[in-house]
């Protein structure tokens, strides 16, 4: 028997697709390896959980928690995800197949690291009620051990709360601001390294942030699109928040300046960027 603090439990895995359920350390080591392979080969659209959080709140109340099973269906059985979320369709009628331990593990890791869109809810223990022998949404932890009803303990899973859109946007902008500061520092280090003696040159390494690439790439694309826009076009909400956070003008010129400082010039040449800045300066003087 292993004693586990209920606060360490996020959700229970009642059904798995594996013929042999992992039971010991070596089994879980194999599951971990498979799960990491899944995460390594996962597209940024799936590892960035913004779309998952939006779809979840569109089809059911934001007060209802999500867990690794919900995310696993979205990632690995996306065509069935909307049916899975439908409160009027049972799990059996949704035609969703059981996930493997590796798939469930990979989904659990994604949720654990995503503090941009989700907040963990505590799991609780509860005895059965007098009116009903079962607690809604709970499973008996000791049903196979022959204890009486008075001795049974029920687990009420906490899962993850979906954060409101405004909170998620604020956190995403902060992640992009950190990325901007990091890249600006790297640019300076690389510039200094180019002028340093050959033996002193060392490649600068960015800080590793698990599963942030999708969030950063999505905001970067939005900034790029706005940088190509006409001068009078209003900035989208996300881009406006990014430019304001970086103390840049809320205009295409400000977006171009961000791209220039980041070194992202896939759609612009440096000369065009400098020309735009010079033209803006001249117009301001006149």
Image: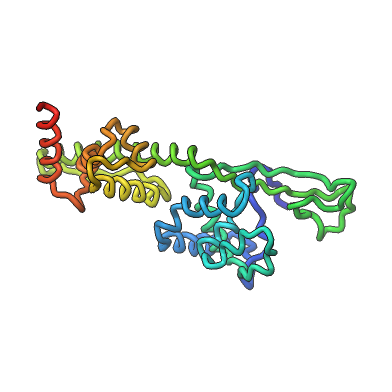
Residue at 39% of width from left, 41% of height from top?
A: 237
Residue at 10% of width from left, 31% of height from top?
A: 282
Residue at 34% of width from left, 38% of height from top?
A: 240
Q: Residue 44 falls in which quadrant of the image? A: bottom left
How many numbered discs, if any? 0
**Quarter of the image containing the C terminus?**
top left
Q: Horizontal and vertical percent for residue 163? A: 54, 42
Q: Horizontal and vertical percent for residue 235? A: 32, 41
Evaluate whether residue 204 shows in this view.
yes
Q: Horizontal and vertical percent for residue 225? A: 28, 49
Identify the image's colour scheme: rainbow, by chain, secondary structure or one colour: rainbow
Instruction: Locate residue 87 relative to residue 233 in the image: left or right.
Output: right
Residue at 46% of width from left, 59% of height from top?
A: 36
Evaluate whether residue 26 shows in this view.
no
- Please tell me which residue lies in front, 52 or 141: 52
State the residue lying farthest toward the bottom: 19
- Please tell me which residue lies in front, 265 or 181: 265
Instruction: Locate residue 71 relative to residue 263 in the image: left or right.
Output: right
- Please tell me which residue lies in front, 176 or 221: 221
Q: Horizontal and vertical percent for residue 276? A: 14, 40
């Amino acid at each position: 028997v292993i004693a586990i603090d209920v606060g360490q439990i996020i959700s229970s895995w009642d059904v798995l697709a594996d013929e042999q359920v992992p039971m010991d350390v070596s089994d879980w080591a194999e599951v971990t390896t498979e799960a990491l392979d899944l995460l390594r080969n996962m597209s940024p659209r799936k590892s960035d959980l913004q779309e998952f959080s939006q779809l979840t709140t569109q089809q059911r109340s934001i007060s209802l928690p999500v867990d690794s099973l919900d995310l696993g269906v979205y990632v690995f059985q996306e065509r069935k995800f909307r049916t899975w979320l439908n409160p009027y369709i049972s799990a059996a009628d949704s035609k969703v197949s059981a996930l493997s331990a590796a798939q469930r593990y990979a989904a659990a890791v994604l949720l654990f690291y995503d503090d941009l869109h989700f907040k963990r809810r505590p799991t609780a223990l509860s005895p059965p009620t007098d009116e009903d022998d079962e607690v809604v949404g709970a499973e008996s932890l000791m049903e196979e051990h022959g204890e009486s009803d008075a001795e049974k303990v029920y687990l009420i899973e906490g899962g993850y709360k979906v954060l409101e859109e405004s909170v998620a946007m604020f956190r995403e902008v902060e992640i992009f601001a950190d990325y901007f500061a990091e890249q600006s520092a790297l640019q300076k280090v690389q510039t200094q390294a180019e002028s340093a003696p050959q033996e002193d040159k060392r490649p600068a390494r960015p800080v590793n942030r698990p599963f942030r690439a999708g969030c950063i790439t999505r905001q970067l694309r939005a900034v790029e699109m706005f940088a190509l826009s006409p001068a009078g076009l209003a900035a989208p909400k996300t881009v406006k928040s990014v430019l304001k956070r970086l103390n840049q003008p809320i205009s295409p010129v400000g977006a171009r300046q961000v791209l220039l400082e980041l070194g992202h010039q896939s759609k612009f040449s440096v000369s065009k960027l400098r020309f735009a800045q010079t033209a803006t300066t001249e117009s301001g003087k006149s």
